[in-house]
Image (cartoon, grey):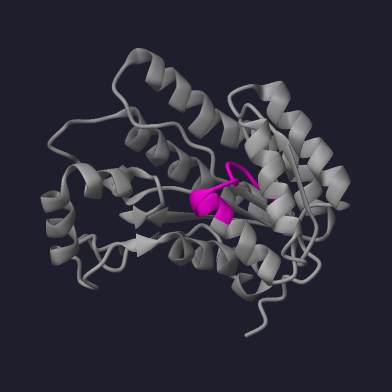
Amino acid sequence: MDLGLAGKKAIVTGSTKGIGRAIVETLLAEGASVAICARDAEGVAAAVAELNALGKGKVWGASVDAGNPDSLKGFIADATRELGGLDIYVHNTSGKPAKTYEAWEANFRIDLMALVLGVDAATEALSANGGGALISIGTTAAGEHFASGANSYSAFKAAVTNWTLGQAQTLGAKGIRCNVVSPGPIWVEGGDWNRVKDGKPEFFAATEKVHPGGRIGGVQDVANAVVFLASPVAGHINGANLTVDGGFMKRVNY
């Protein structure tokens, strides 16, 4: 199936590695051009070089502090100019889960306010070509309680989901579809589940054992969902929270 993404322009935040990187590579494979960002300038430069070497769509990138409004807004303006417009905005920046007061403040800025400010800065460009797509990366952890207690990550991902889906009502009138992709346990090289496997192999094995598919997901599983929702093929999907967990969650959403 042709997703109709050839020539589209996308911004993906937090996109030099992991899920963000997989989203970028999948968008490029479909013929889109992409602007990427992360905090580490060297990492951004290396990723831009590697992605452009694929010979797909144009890739442009910059170092951004997503918790700094001026830094984020400047990046969005520069990216839109470099790409020649904007059709897709993927919010993937996120802080790490923790329980300290400082961590809560960081997650507030990086997870939630970066989304609110980023979408505000991108709205005009997204609506300029007759419609665009906003996709936020959530988590299934936003809908669960854990024995270790609440943390900043899950709480603000819940806020990200609520805010994004709420925008489906207001931004939908401007032709901007707003959806969330919520991954369950996902394997990322060097990521959380990689560390769990190394540090708590019994727990990792037990998690995979109770998974209906017998394995946790991979970054490409998430990227495929995001790119589908970003595409014109999903043109009548607005205000959805798409869970990508292979059936790991047991809840029923009506």
State which region is magenta: 11-21
Q: Quadrant of residue 250?
A: bottom left
Viewer-proximal residue among 57 and 240: 57
Viewer-proximal residue among 158 and 152: 152
Q: Is residue 65 left or right of residue 159?
A: right
Residue at image position (69%, 30%) is 72
Residue at image position (72%, 75%) is 4
Does residue 32 lie above or below 92 as drawn? below
Q: Quadrant of the N terminus?
A: bottom right
Does residue 88 lie above or below 57 as drawn? above
| Badge count | 0
Q: Quadrant of residue 120?
A: top right
Q: Quadrant of the C terminus?
A: bottom left
Does residue 244 lie above or below 201 as drawn? below
Residue 75: tell me if it is visible. yes
Residue 17 belongs to the span the image colors magenta: yes
Viewer-proximal residue among 219 and 245: 219
Residue 231 belongs to the span the image colors magenta: no
Q: Is residue 93 left or right of residue 187?
A: right
Q: Farthest bottom residue?
A: 1
Q: Position of residue 236 (x, y in %)?
A: 60, 70
Residue at image position (63%, 47%) is 170
Residue 119: tell me if it is visible. no
Q: Position of residue 187 (x, y in %)?
A: 36, 56
Q: Is residue 103 left or right of residue 2?
A: left
Q: Position of residue 217 (x, y in %)?
A: 35, 63
